[in-house]
Image (cartoon, rainbow, N blue to C red):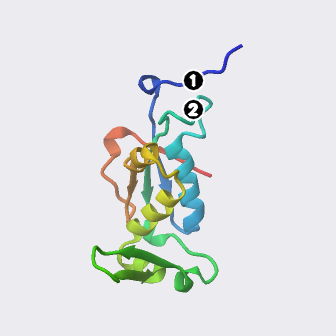
């Protein structure tokens, strides 16, 4: 008996909607990363991109547990010498909650070309409305 290896042309991609309202940011991001990688499928192959599309709604209502809202920072560097910028997560969640969710999910993916392709299938929205109704997404409960 041989091991099944999925091929890129044989992957069936579904669409899932995750509601982040009242849930911890890290739990939602971890589940979204599993769906994007395709680890929930029995045909999961590590070197093939076999994940699904993920829509995360209500990112503005996701919560950070403990004191992470005041202690956690998002850092990015501009092209200029010494221009390291830091933004606290409570301010980031107030201004761009979908960016905070995308950063959390992308941090849980691998750091390779496949992960960059998987991150393109993530859609995050601050409110409860999204524009992907034509794809007939399924609600994902965890």
Rate crowding at label 2 as few (under 14), some (14 to 19) or many (20 or more) other CA atoms within 10 Å. some
Instruction: Give the numbered dot on residue 5.
Output: 1
* Kind of element beneath mark 1: loop
Question: Compared to 119, does 97 lie above or below?
Answer: below
Residue in the picture at 34% in, 45% down: 133
Total numbered badges shown on the rendered structure: 2
Question: Compared to 1, does 92 lie above or below?
Answer: below
Rate crowding at label 1 as few (under 14), some (14 to 19) or many (20 or more) other CA atoms within 10 Å. few
Percent across and percent down for residue 134 are: 31, 40
Residue in the picture at 43% in, 76% down: 75
Mark 1 → mark 2, Cα distance in angstroms:
6 Å
Viewed as shown, does residue 46 lie left or right of 121?
Answer: right
Residue in the picture at 61% in, 84% down: 67
Q: Mark 1–mark 2 contact, CB under 8 Å?
A: yes
N-terminal of the pair, mark 1 or mark 2, is: 1
Residue in the picture at 28% in, 78% down: 80
**Residue matched to label 2:** 45
Q: Quadrant of residue 22?
A: bottom right
Residue most extreme to the bottom: 70
User: Does residue 100 appear anywhere in the picture?
Assistant: yes
Question: Compared to 140, does 91 lie above or below?
Answer: below
Percent across and percent down for residue 5 are: 57, 23
* Kind of element beneath mark 2: loop
Residue most extreme to the top: 1
110 or 118: nearer the viewer: 110
58 or 69: nearer the viewer: 69
User: Does residue 58 appear anywhere in the picture?
Assistant: no
Residue most extreme to the left: 80
Instruction: Give the numbered dot on residue 105.
Output: none
Percent across and percent down for residue 106 are: 47, 57
């Amino acid at each position: 008996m041989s091991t099944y290896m999925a091929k890129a042309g044989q992957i069936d991609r579904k669409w899932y909607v995750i509601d982040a309202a009242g849930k911890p940011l890290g739990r939602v991001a971890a589940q979204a990363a599993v769906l994007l990688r395709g680890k929930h499928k029995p045909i999961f192959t590590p070197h093939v991109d076999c994940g699904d599309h993920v829509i995360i709604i209500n990112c503005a209502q996701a919560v950070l547990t403990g004191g992470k809202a005041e202690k956690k920072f998002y850092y990015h560097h501009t092209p200029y010498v010494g221009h390291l910028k830091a933004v606290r997560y409570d301010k980031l969640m107030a201004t761009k909650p979908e960016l905070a969710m995308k950063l959390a999910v992308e941090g849980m993916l691998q750091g390779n070309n496949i992960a960059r392709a998987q991150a393109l299938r993530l859609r995050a929205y601050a409110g409860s409305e999204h524009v992907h109704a034509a794809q007939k997404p399924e609600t994902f409960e965890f």
